[in-house]
Image (tube, rainbow, N blue to C red):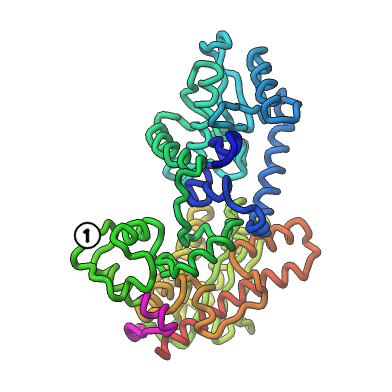
Amino acid sequence: MGSPAQNRVTAQDFYDHDKCPHRVFLNHFGDPSEKLPHSDFLNLLFENALTHEREVVADLAYEMPREVTLEDRALSTLQLMRAGAERIYQGVLLQPNESGIPDLLEKVPGNSRLGDYFYKPVDIKSGSGYKDEAKGILRTDYGMQLYHYGLLLQAVQGTFPPEAEILNRDRKRILYPFDQFSAAYQETLAEIRLLTAGAKSDEPALASECGACQWWGHCERVLVAAEDVTLLSDVGRSKKVALNSVGVRSIRDIPSFDFSGVKLKGIGPKTVASMKLAAISVLSNKLQVLAKAALPDPPRKVYLDFEDDPTQELIYLCGMWIEPALHGLNYHGLLCTDEAGEERIWAEFQRLCVAIAAEDYAVFHYSPYERVKIAALERRYAVSERDALTLFKSRMVDLYPVVKHSAVLPARGYGLKRIAPFVGVKYSAADAGGAQSIVWFQEYQRNPGRQDVLETLLTYNREDCVAMKSVEEWLRQL
């Protein structure tokens, strides 16, 4: 099934497999006419990554294969390696069943078929290079891609490089030791080979990555037609595999299935009860009330929503809807476009905390995100109003777990955008969302005169705050 070139395992396959194994199969064998256009956010990421790569490479001395076909470029790359080029940009590594195009191949002293040197791969990334920089945890998807390049280099030079590097957004070199990726790579490679050969297709499963995938239109049709179990909230790929193993393939199978006689990994009695309630709600298209929400009801209420751009590690907007109005305003949108501005909005945020410190109030937010962002700002900058900030944090109420504890909704998830229609909220922008907010923000960064873009950005944030208000009021009426 498929041509040898079509079946080659690429570094991209490892990145895609990390997100969704079925995507690997579709990229090799799916109908291209079914692919959706890239979202504005993905286009922005590609553009930023390409710009960053060009800027980094512009400061480096390198040689580059100039030929057109992949095969000729691979031969040219080998010739450059044999000639001892110090650095090769966009070199092609080609084997009958695998291929790769690392951003850079860099010459390292040592022994190989080439002489008293060998090459190691270096990729240029517009991110930090870490999954968790504070803990020093490297990204597995990057590690897999680099390891793939390492094996391709070994086939050419006879020496497997012990490590690779990521050149990150700050132009810092992040070391990727290969020994920590070996076992995972071999296990994943075996699965990818089956997918790229067409011997296995895997199956679609609804996940957070789906909305950014070009194959989502195709997969959504398949999932809806099958009434797939992952259309239920909190039932992801791993639970789907477990359920499928005992014959539970559809949402319709769940309410009547006797789970007492089977033992499924990650699916205990509480999960079973939750799944059954969710299945009944979806099949009947009716909300089920579980419990009355326990919410504080003070005279003043604050609805808090942060927006951040992870590509710049910048919190660019802190929005608060305050009732009754504070300083003559219900909506306070604290916006910045750079790090200096971020420190400024942090100071303004603390001043607002001081302004309501003497009052009886509650702060509503949705998900742990706001607490995480406040903690990040505390780490980055000094806290000038410790007592008021501590009080503010003690008054914070996360509405997300309250919703999940109070009701079962016929929805695919419990994110704010998912439940908004159930509480009568409609956003002004059809593409409203956190990713699109970043697109608007970066457009405003480039063109500060675009007041229309600024207004769109602030409107979205304000509507998020008001949506939380609607959720809070809806919860009280259950």
Within the magenta stretch, is there residue 34? no
Magenta region: 278-293
Q: Dividing the picture into quarters, in which one does residue 280 lie?
A: bottom left
- Describe residue 363's horizontal placement relative to residue 35 as left or right: left
- Mark 1: amino acid: Lys
Which residue is rendered at x = 48% and y = 73% of the image?
A: 365
Q: Residue farthest to the front?
A: 1
Q: Is residue 365 above or below residue 446?
A: below
What is the x, y in percent for residue 453? Answer: 74, 67
Q: Residue farthest to the right?
A: 449
Q: Nearer the viewer, residue 401 or 149?
A: 149
Q: Residue farthest to the bottom?
A: 477
Q: Is residue 458 visible?
A: yes
What is the x, y in percent for residue 412? Answer: 46, 71
Q: What number of labels is visible?
A: 1
Q: Residue farthest to the top?
A: 115
Q: Nearer the viewer, residue 231 or 402?
A: 231
- Describe residue 46's horizontal placement relative to residue 278 as left or right: right
What is the x, y in percent for residue 200? Answer: 45, 46
Which residue is rendered at x = 33% and y = 71% of the image?
A: 253
Q: Dividing the picture into quarters, in which one does residue 166 lie?
A: top right
The residue that disc 1 covers is 263
The quarter of the image holding the N terminus is: top right
Q: Dividing the picture into quarters, in which one does residue 239 lie?
A: bottom left
